[in-house]
Image: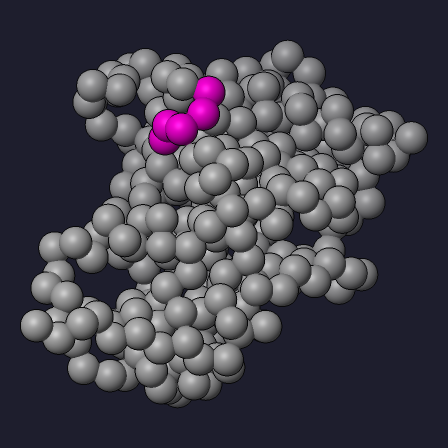
Amino acid sequence: MREIEYAAPTSVDDAIAALAGAGVCRPFAGGTDLLVQMRSVPPSEQKWVDIKRIPEMTSIALDASGLRLGAAASCWEVSQHKGLRETFPGLVEAAELIGSIQIQNRATVGGNVCNASPAADTVPALIAVGADCVIAGPDGRRTVPVAEFVTGPGTTQLGDNELLVELVVPPVAARTADAYLRFSPRGEMDIAVVGAGVSVTLASDGTCTAARVALGAVGPTAFGVPAAADALVGTSLDETALERAAAASRDAANPIDDKRGTVTYRRTVAGVLTRRAVQLAASRATERSS
């Protein structure tokens, strides 16, 4: 029986060429989801394209132009990056919730996005900070907002022989901060019943001038909630504004009933987490402006 075919390119172009081979070709970063999924594919039909030797895909660059996060950078590297922790604490919070520390040493933010689970933690956190996906393929490169990249459970906008190269986040505006909160039965080693990512910008008088709200695990994909953001803008984030944002998240949630939570329960939690994430992000934005 033929062994699994393995390639370890050192450039994006070589990786794209390797993906064009015969059999079931898959980019291999951490493999924490992929190793399980590929069990159903006969070894003789498998080809693994290891992308962790490509410098562009493992780098973390944070400067005045924003963040460029390589798709193969591990969640552990993200969580330990001082600049990221200070600038995008919500994204770091999401990365720290992916499995155990051992898993985080292998798992990647890019892999979490490409796995396209409705309950992926990093996707709503990335939507909240306005992140884009940079995709490379035989026809060149293109950019897709994270909010549009995942098209359904387990499906993305990646075409044949295409690869997610990096995630790009614009620079953080003044008095802006993000937060990510998740509810799950266990604090660790579990997936979200509901996840909420939020970013807010405050004026010098504390008025909210911009906001993003995103939810995960309450629909086929993570998604932004413009009505919740609109409920916040122009307010001092008082109780009325927080309740309107929570209500908008409850209304936008479209979860399923399963053993981890009922539809009614998940909608209620979506509102609660939205409120708490807004308050946490606002507290951080206030600290940055002081």
The residue drawn where x is 20% and y is 19% is 259
Decide: is 242 above or below 91: above
The residue drawn where x is 21% and y is 52% is 37
x and y, in percent, of residue 60 in the image:
65, 60
Residue 188 is inside the magenta segment: yes
Q: Nearer the viewer, residue 41 or 137?
A: 41
Decide: is 111 above or below 87: below
Rendered-image quadrant of the C terminus: top right
Residue 212 is inside the magenta segment: no
The answer to whether residue 58 of the structure is visible from this angle is yes
Left or right of residue 207, residue 76 in this image: left
Task: Count numbered badges in the picture.
Answer: 0
Which region is colored magenta? 187-191
Q: How is the image coloured?
A: one colour
Rendered-image quadrant of the N terminus: bottom left
Q: Nearer the viewer, residue 219 or 103?
A: 103
The answer to whether residue 183 of the structure is visible from this angle is no
The residue drawn where x is 24% and y is 83% is 21
Classify residue 233 by image quadrant. top right
Left or right of residue 286, residue 111 in this image: left
Decide: is 287 above or below 77: above
Secondary structure predominantly adopted by residues drawn in magenta = loop
Classify residue 186 by image quadrant. top left
x and y, in percent, of residue 66 in the image:
71, 59
